[in-house]
Amino acid sequence: MEFFKEIAVTIFSIFNEMSVYLLLGFLFAGILHVFVPQQLFLKYLSKNNWVSVLYAIMFAVPLPLCSCGVVPAAMALYKEGASKGSVISFLIATPQTGVDSIIATYSLLGLPFALIRPIAAFFTSIFAGLITNIFTSNEKNIKISFQKRTEEQKLSFTQKIKKIFQYGYVEMLEDIGKVLIFGLIIAGLIAYFIPNNFFIIFKDNTILTMLLILVVTIPMYICATGSIPIAIALMMKGMSSGTALVLLMAGPGANIVSMMVIGKVLGKKTFCVYLITLIIGAIGFGLFIDNFLPANWFDVSKFSITEHNNNVGFYYFKILCSFILFTLLANSILFKKNREKVEIMENNAVKNAIAFKIDGMSCNHCKANVTKVISNLKSVTGVSVNLSEGVAYVEGTPTDEEIKSAVEAIGFKFSGRKER
């Protein structure tokens, strides 16, 4: 019973510290999603120069894209004419500089970490983008043009407010809710099983620790927000703050699925540049933190799983926020299946719709990108994508080759028609 108690206390303590800031971050993400015109980005990202790389990073900073959602978004940018350098910069910068991950980083790791994390991502992105442009200077950017349909219906102010909360507290939580819970559970297990000051044995070989973290984290999927509780749990066991930055950069920046997509769509050369520059940037800034910045800036000893805030009113406010966030997480996980069942029933009710199996979709951004590329085909009159099934229900007269070409251009796999 002591095992479960200690893990539960750790999970609750970290969750309680993050809840206020996560709720605020998701709200800002919803606001940005509704009011930032993402379609304006493309005309600034097409050239193979440092300006397009800088624009890509500037556009990445406010975007509320999770670590899995950024991949299809970046592939969509590439498909519509963005240079490989700007796409690589966008891929590295976006998960690290999202408003939700910055606020969540501040909530547990403090202001210095919340500042150094996006700064490291910024300079690593510039470095990666410029190197990519050099190695791909002889390659031509692709440009796949689709028929433009009528402009999206303008929303009223009330509809925009509803959309903000729908996106921030429903869609984003559906995308990262499970991964966030996974990160909290891992943090609890680390707190129980790993001895205190475990990483002290590596104190004379920081690079070895960083390489060990890279080997473990790169193949895994760890979202930018979900990696934070893991990082703080390891730092409480003696891991250096610089190594924690390596975890926070490499975990969200690279995983086996995203690497396969990048290699397939952008090519092996670009993939190698992406991975190598990400590793160099993470280790470089990690060593900079450990060797040149004051250690007390990144001190996590003040964080205690048994400590209550001296401000009783604020402590109970955090409890309230934790309850609200827990309820929203439960809604996103438990009731998502019910919503998807309704979608399946509605799709099956459309007799003329053709069901196409699309593999590789993992979040609502994936769903939105697949919907967009299919709906822009001239032969398509309507499309509805079900994320849990991995199926696109398409109305019209599209051929298998048209659907295959559209979805594989943004990094997904076409698996043929599905029997209905």
Image: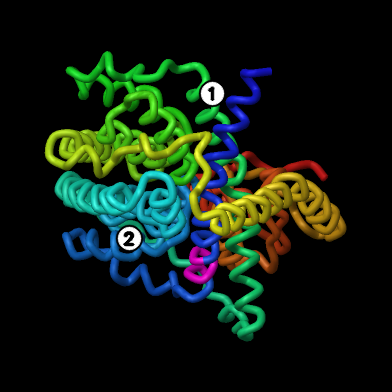
> Which of the numbered marks, if any, corresponds to residue 239?
none
Residue at x 36%, y 39% (from the top left corner): 248
Q: Is residue 31 magenta?
A: yes
Magenta highlight range? 28-33
Tag of residue 82: 2
Q: Quadrant of the N terminus?
A: top right
Q: Position of residue 128 (x, y in %)?
A: 22, 46
**Magenta span has 49?**
no
Work out whether residue 416 or residue 132 is closer to the camera in this orientation and state it. Answer: 132
Task: Give the labeled residue for mark 1.
Answer: 189
Q: To which quarter of the image does residue 347 belong?
A: bottom right
**In terms of depth relative to the viewer, which is nearer, 183 or 159?**
183
Which marked residue is nearer to the observer: mark 2 or mark 1? Answer: 1
**Amino acid on which disc 1 is placed:** Leu
At which x and y percent is residue 25? 49, 60
Quadrant in the picture for the C terminus: top right
Viewed as shown, does residue 105 lie left or right of 34?
Answer: left
SS type, badge 2:
loop
The residue drawn where x is 79% and y is 55% is 343
